[in-house]
Amino acid sequence: MMNVLIVDDSRLARTELRHLLRAFPDVAVVGEARHADEARAQLGALRPDVLLLDVQMPGQSGFELLASLDAAPHVIFTTAYDEYALQAFAVNALDYLLKPVQEPRLAAALAKARARLLAPAGAPPAPAEPAAAAQAPLTAQDQVFVKDGERCWFVKLADVKLFEINGSYTRIYFDDHRPLIPRTLQQLEARLDPKVFFRVNRQQIINLKWIAGIEPWFSNTLRLALRGGPEVEVSRQQSVRFRELLSL
């Protein structure tokens, strides 16, 4: 069994994590803590394998809690704030999950914890994985970290030609890569430069600079061909906006 301690000042957040963890039969929640002082006491008594740790809490933050410990279990941060991602990986966190936590992302984080716990004794720890959270507003010249599983890239947004919904994730098209990130199109649209990135329909956002061809389509809509593919269809409402945006 993998023993987990949940540290979060929000009762609802702790309850939601407990609910999500029920899907993993090899995981046992051995305790909960509302703040750093409670967490320290429970860490000494319970000795969990994994800490699901919030960042911002009354009193000390999650980072201050870790700094006060002589030794800590494996840490997975769970937070509503994306600006602490680099700091999280600097302290060798296994993963950094944004609230509301999605089960696939939690499953991936727990898989990392299992792999670390099953590693042979004395094996060197895997190097910390860099991550960066996008900061709005983003221009085409900004570079962002994209992470999918164990792979990561540092990508200039000008090189991204398409964002496309894939289940509860979004697929990013750049070069020959198609990674998935745990973001909605609404979240991305709020951060991307509207002069460069355009929401063509409910499923896709394109980079206008990657358009290779435009043709009329059914019911007064448009179909756009992107350099190197694919083709995308612009919804009727967005076709009107597209014409207005690019007309003299």
Image (cartoon, helix red, strand yellow):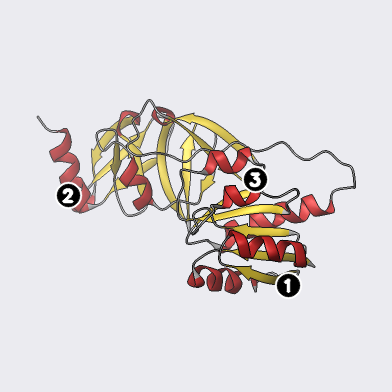
* Quadrant location, the N terminus: bottom right
Residue 192 percent coordinates (x, y)? 33, 39
Residue 6 percent coordinates (x, y)? 62, 65
Q: Which residue is mark 2?
A: 220
Q: Nearer the viewer, residue 132 or 173?
A: 132
Assign a secondary structure to mark 3: helix
Instruction: Choose mark 2 or mark 1, whichever is in front.
Output: 1
Mark 1 residue type: Pro
Would you say residue 178 is visible in this rendering? no
Q: Which residue is mark 3?
A: 67
The label shown at residue 25 is 1
| Drawn side of residue 207 relative to residue 13, left or right | left
Query: Residue at coordinates 45% horizontally, 55% vertically from top-left?
Result: 80
First in sequence: mark 3 vs mark 2? 3
Mark 3 residue type: Ala
Residue 29 percent coordinates (x, y)? 69, 71
First in sequence: mark 1 vs mark 3? 1
| Drawn side of residue 177 relative to residue 137, left or right | right
Instruction: Choose mark 3 or mark 2, whichever is in front.
Output: 3
